[in-house]
Amino acid sequence: MERVISGIRPTGNLHLGNYFGAVKSFIEMQHQYECMFFIADWHSLTTHPTPENIRQSVKTILAEYLACGIDPEVAPIYIQSDVKDVLELYLYLNMNAYLGELERVTSFKEKARKQPDNVNAGLLTYPTLMAADILMHKADKVPVGKDQEQNMEMARLFARRFNRIYNVEYFKEPESFHFNKTAVKVPGLNGTGKMGKSEGNAIYLCDDEATIRKKVMRAVTDAGPTMLNQEKPEPIANLFSLLELVSTKETYDYFNDQYNNMSIRYGDLKKQLAEDINAFCAPIRERILQFSADDDYLRRVATDGAEKAHARAEKTIKEVRQIIGFK
Ligand code: ADP
Ligand code: TRP
């Protein structure tokens, strides 16, 4: 069975954008591929060198993943910093990664611009650590968003280069993967753009009913359609996109017809949308609370995940040492 690995940095709670854009496809994938997921806590030090409470953030994201439906019996979840093998591979890959190419990576340039006082070597070598995460599992497929494409190209480059330098056919080149082929972009509630943590427009899976209602009722709209069957401007199209994700087809069609015949009342649409988002989030929210309160279970999941990841990684590292010439 093909192997899949993916990681996420523990930098905040999961929102609807993360869910429909990424987590949902992980959940569907776990039954078709040999999946592992990990929480990239070391990676988060590249931008958050003194995390307020890294253990808590890791725990939160772990509980949220489980609450969404990742089954750790099928798809183990581990914490990056629990599986030290990756560090050795990171070191070897770094020895054959060149300053010029690392400096040209767009996300490095962006982050260097954002944090000019902290252009650290970890930031520069973010792609080699990510390549090590992937190559240590000999993953075939890596489900990531479009923004990770360049990091994936680097991973393939490092795999090819390793094979060439040591004259072996050892690492295969991992491919980026979009489970549902067409990537979903979940819009925010402020009229334009996508939902995101840093955008301040996100509905979190752990938001309670009142918070969800408040956020949805505040969503940007306009004065209403002025022509029959008019094309929807972005803020309205965004509300309909959200409706499409969380409501039934009947509800969507009902409001769509109302929009088309100009009888729509945005207040009613928002009320329904808030209700449907809440119906979607409520069971997840409840499970988040349950998992978050069960430290023993979370620890067991992470320990078990780390053991499985280590078993695979150790084998890779031993082989890599031999290839390079270490005994
Ligand atoms: P954020 O943008 O909130 O910081 P991350 O960058 O941590 O989120 O993204 C984690 C995953 O969720 C990535 O795979 C990313 O592509 C996906 N994702 C984030 N926001 C959205 C969105 N609005 N629509 C679709 N996918 C998204
Ligand atoms: N760079 C990824 C992100 O920001 C997180 C990540 C780190 C990752 N290592 C990985 C994703 C390995 C997939 C595979 O979203």
Image: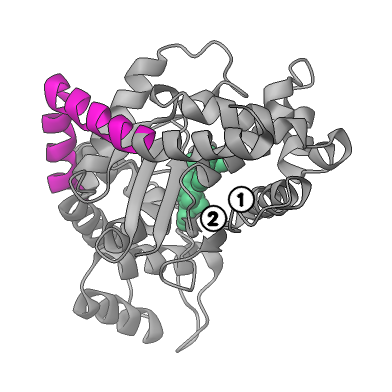
Asked if disc 1 and disc 2 are in contact, CB closer than 8 Å, the reply is yes
Amino acid carrying label 2: it is: Gly
Locate the N terminus and report the quarter of the image it occupies. Answer: bottom left
The quadrant of the rendering that contains the C terminus is: top right
Q: Can residue 37 be seen in this view?
A: yes
Region in magenta: 281-310
**Image disc number at residue 193:** none
**What amino acid is found at the position of numbered circle 1 in the picture?**
Gln
Name the residue tied to disc 1.
148
| Viewer-nearest residue: 307 or 295 | 307
At horizontal 31% and vertical 80% (from top left) the residue drawn is: 258
**Image: 279 above or below 65:** below
Q: What element carries label 2?
A: loop
Please give the name of the residue rendered at 23% of the width and 78% of the height, measured from the top-left corner. 249
Question: Can residue 286 be found in the magenta stretch?
Answer: yes
Q: In this view, does 98 lie above or below 247?
A: above
Coordinates of residue 159 in the picture (x, y in percent): 66, 50
The x, y position of residue 302, in whole percent, is 26, 29
**50 with respect to 301 (left or right):** right
Q: Would you say the beta carbon of the disc 2 residue lies within 8 angstroms of ligand 1?
A: yes
Q: How far apart are marks 1 and 2 (CA)?
A: 6 Å
Nearest the eye: 2 or 219: 2
Q: Within the image, what quadrant is residue 253 found in?
A: bottom left
> Where is residue 33 shown, x and y percent of the image?
33, 62
Residue 171 horizontal side relative to residue 255, left or right:
right
Q: In the shown orientation, is residue 22 left or right of residue 151?
A: left
Q: Which residue is drawn at 24% across and 54% down?
A: 277
Judge: label 1 CB < 8 Å from ligand 2: yes
Vertical side of 35 occupied by 95: above or below: above
Q: Where is residue 280 in the image (x, y as percent from the top left)?
A: 20, 54
Examine the rendering and report whether any part of residue 15 can be seen.
no
Residue receiving disc 2: 145
